[in-house]
Image (cartoon, rainbow, N blue to C red):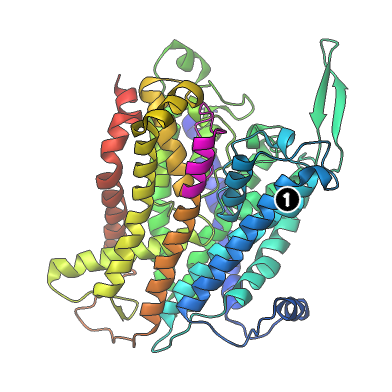
Amino acid sequence: MAPAWAAIAVIATVVGILAIVYRPLGAYMARVYTTTRDLAVEKIVYRIVGVNPAIEQSWQVYLRSVIAFSAVGVIVVYLMQRFQSVLPWALGLPPVEESLSFNTAISFVANTNWQSYSPEQTMGYSVQLAGLAVQNFVSAAVGMAVAVALIRGFARAKTGTLGNFWVDLTRGVGRILLPISVVSALLLVAGGVIQNANGFVDAATLTGGTQSLPGGPVASQEAIKLLGTNGGGFFNANSAHPFENPGGFTNLLELLLMFAIPVSLTRTFGIMVGDKKQGYAIVGTMGIIALASISLLVVAETVGAGSAPHAAGGAMEGKETRFGPVLSAIFGAFSTLTSTGAVNAMHDSFTAFGGAVAMVDMMIGEVAPGGVGSGLYGILVMAIIAVFVAGLMVGRTPEYLGKRIGRREMTFASLYILTTPAIVLAGTALSFAIPAVRSSVTDVSMANDGLHGFSEVLYAFTSAANNNGSAFAGLTANTPWFNTALGVAMLLGRLLPIVFVLALAGSLASQDKVPVTAGTLPTHKPLFVGLLVGVIVIVSALTYFPVLALGPLAEGLL
């Protein structure tokens, strides 16, 4: 099949299945977060935690709960790694080094899953299951909870509360993520993904030698890492490893898992604000950006310059032959359009323009459809900015979903869109501006010098600050500088946007509803969708174009 038709077939299949699950899954999640009934097991959890589920929280209390829960998660995952050797199922592996433990703990709590190590040679099964896999569930549930809190900010009037974080967290894990993950894990096992408690097994090779093959509970972790848009992998090769992603069926399933909840949450949003058309407008915006990104990345990887790419039907370096350039490009677009970071090919081997598209997917804020929860609240912040811009054009006070967008709301929205770029650009600049650090970066970490080496560093901080987790794998990031700097970038890139989103939600919830008038901008029609797409692209382009011109764009033009 020609690359163009192969891409169309895969995308059409994914879109068709997403269209089928969109309404039921979105409606189900709306019921989960709006019902007043607690399950028996949830009541037990609340008693253990010491939480009264009937008491709602202000945005300040909601935020403190998020921060406290995240802090405990970082400490627990860090200590599990440091004391790994005394845990069961350690597979004889030693404790993880301090800076790497710090980086990994923050990475999984922040829903990033950046891995500066080879998982199968570094983490035993106890850390993988009780530490990393657990964080895959709860970090995704935290993102969903924050998104729901912002939706309540739009839906409520003259109230100082946004719900209860502990209730939202518990329901997100128990009613949404866990049951879907169980079904997905079974499907992955049926597709050939391994799930066992075996250690390393020696196997005879075709040449008569032996090779030590790792086993492990892979399917269960693979399901939630993709469903929760966490990323990373049980193995160093990630979804390019045949034990994680054996073939076409599992590859398609993994694509669907990455998009299922972020896309369906727009339906949840429409239901909870009482206007389903608003959800259609948001998912339409996501779809336009996603389709453009996927198309550009497929073209970049299939129309590569040189005789070898032409003979192979595309740029095959760093790609699995069972997937080829088309499925590799689509998977790369899906993982960077969400905050997943899983890969089935080496992004470092993408063409210069292909790598640039993957970077831009993250730089626009991962809003098409973005991470679980984080994509929705990210694009809603952009919608507020788009409404404000439209208001300036006609000289009218902007309104969105019946709430006035004033100075306070725009302050929080502006801080939100400035935070991540500041972290990315500062981290990249410091890596080359500090003499001692620059020596470590250029001499130890960068596998390539010049423009591509710069792109590797830029990609690392872009991925970390946007809580994506994918990497230009040519960069050796397991150094004191990168473990520390990327750890800080992941932590700030996760928590600071949440601070501004919850503050914005609290401000909106305290307002009364503004009646719709003839001058109100309809935010469910194609005109607003086009405006929102333009705002997202322009904000990102103006922020990142200069640094992109120093790396992947310059490399592609050489």
Residue extending furthest toward the front: 436
Picture coordinates of residue 265, whole percent (x, y): 52, 65
Q: Is residue 471 magenta?
A: yes
- What residue is disc 1 on? 80
Q: Residue 206's image quarter?
A: top right
Label 1 crowd (10 A; few <14 / some 14-19 / many >=20): many
Name the residue located 82 percent from the left edge and 25 percent from the top edge. Answer: 212
Is 393 situated above or below 475?
below
Q: How many marks?
A: 1
**The C terminus lies in quadrant:** top left
Name the residue located 21 percent from the left edge and 64 percent from the top edge. Answer: 389
Q: Is residue 480 magenta?
A: yes
Q: Is residue 451 visible?
A: yes
Secondary structure beneath disc 1?
Answer: helix
Q: Closer to the camera, 478 or 520? A: 478
Residue extending furthest toward the left: 395
Q: Is residue 295 visible?
A: no
**The N terminus lies in quadrant:** top right
Q: Closer to the camera, 227 or 214? A: 214
Is 491 situated above or below 245?
below
Q: Closer to the camera, 436 or 189? A: 436
Q: Is residue 377 left or right of residue 233?
A: left
Picture coordinates of residue 359, whole percent (x, y): 41, 39
Q: Is residue 64 left or right of residue 74?
A: left
Tell me which segment is drawn in magenta.
468-488
Name the residue located 36 percent from the left edge and 78 percent from the top edge. Answer: 507
Q: Residue 285's image quarter?
A: bottom left
Picture coordinates of residue 535, whole percent (x, y): 27, 56
Picture coordinates of residue 344, whole percent (x, y): 59, 34
Is 389 situated above or below 234?
below
Going by the numbered disc 1, the residue's amino acid type is: Met
